[in-house]
Amino acid sequence: MSSRVVLSGMEFHARHGVYDEEARFGARFVVDVELFWPFAAIPDELDRAVNYEEIYAAVEQETTRTRVQLIEVLTANIARRLLREQPLLESVTVRVHKPHAPLPGVLRDVYAELSLQRHD
């Protein structure tokens, strides 16, 4: 049996990237998280569930209060933090989108995706 909750399209202004201009001006980043945990038989009580407000706050903090060069590193940092802070989670999938990546061409989106299980 598999159950998941998805927080999709969380948008933040952050300063990640390799170039000085990215650190100075920042850009829009979009984060999706898939939270895998067994909720089919839980009671209707928040303290027995994963709190999505806490998930959002953790993603926001990792995205806006730290600076990394690579979205791959940011993606891994978010995934590890969610597993560390949310004991009910069995696994997570995190996607960090950088839709306005400074590339010499036309594209809709660049994103990094990582799936981690609790034992990883």
Image: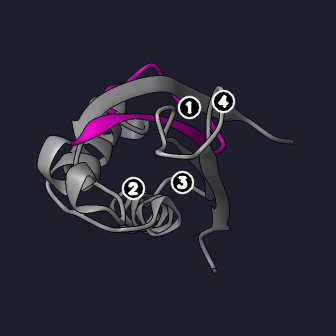
Distance from Cα at disc 4 to Cα at disc 2: 38 Å
Q: Secondary structure at mark 1?
A: loop
Distance from Cα at disc 3 to Cα at disc 1: 14 Å
The three-letter code of the residue at mark 2 reads Gln
The three-letter code of the residue at mark 3 reads Leu
Instruction: Tell me which numbered mark, 1 or 4, is placed earlier along the sequence.
Output: 1
Residue shown at the point (31%, 67%) measured from the top left = 68
- Quadrant of the image containing the N terminus: top right
Count neighbours of disc 3 (C-alpha within 10 A) and say few if under 14, some if 14 to 19, many if 20 or more.
some
Q: Nearer the viewer, mark 1 or mark 2?
A: 2
The three-letter code of the residue at mark 1 reads Ile
The residue to which callout 3 is attached is: 89
Distance from Cα at disc 1 to Cα at disc 2: 16 Å
The residue to which callout 1 is attached is: 42
Residue 101, label in figure: none
Residue 86, label in figure: 2
The residue to which callout 4 is attached is: 106
Q: Which residues are magenta?
A: 26-47
